[in-house]
Image (cartoon, rainbow, N blue to C red):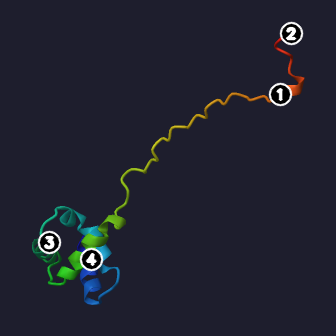
Amino acid sequence: MEEDIKHLIHLFQKADVKRRRKLYECFASIFESQNSYVITIEMLNEKLGAQVVSRADVKYIRAHCRKWQKPSTPTEQPAMAKVQKRATPKITWSDPDQAPDPAS
């Protein structure tokens, strides 16, 4: 964990593009607690031991963290009921000239 914190501080100092995702991966529980951004920033900076996390970082992470989360269970497609076709009566056409005479 100490290595991760040093690495995170280095990423923030260099303004690396992956710093926010790495911050979320290390401290996901803080973001899931739904604190205000001020409290979240204070908690993160306290854990890191440096004032490197800003409001923009927290706002960005909260907007994008849902797509970074790994699915806990594989998503299953809902079972689709098969549509049964209605049985259509077979229509047979006949030639009226060849029909038997009903009068006879």
Q: Which residue is mark 2?
A: 104
Mark pair 2, 1: CA separation: 19 Å
Residue found at x 55% / y 37%: 82
Q: Which residue is mark 1?
A: 94
Residue type for callout 3 = Thr
Q: Which label's residue is closer to the chain start, 4 or 2?
A: 4
Mark 1 secondary-structure assignment: loop
Q: Which mark is residue 8?
A: none
CA distance for labels 4 and 3: 13 Å
Nearest to viewer (mark 1 / mark 3): 1
Q: Position of residue 97 (x, y in %)?
A: 88, 26
Q: Residues within 10 Å of mark 1 (few under 14, many from 20)?
A: few
Image quarter hosting the C terminus: top right
| Res 63 quadrant in image | bottom left
Left or right, 90 with respect to 55, comes to right
User: Label 3, on which residue?
Assistant: 40
- Identified by mark 4, the residue type is Tyr
- Circles 2 and 1 in contact, beta carbons < 8 Å: no
User: Distance from label 1 to label 3 (Cα)?
Assistant: 83 Å
Graded by Cα atoms within 10 Å as few (under 14), some (14 to 19) or many (20 or more), the crowding at tag 4 reads few
Rendered image quadrant of residue 44: bottom left
For label 2, the SS is loop
| Residue at x 23%, y 68% (from the top left corner) | 27
Q: Residue at x 16, y 62 (%)?
A: 33
Mark 4 vs 3, N-terminal side: 3
Q: CA distance from mark 3 to mark 2?
A: 98 Å
Q: Which residue is mark 4?
A: 60
User: In the orientation shown, which residue stands out farthest toward the right?
Assistant: 98
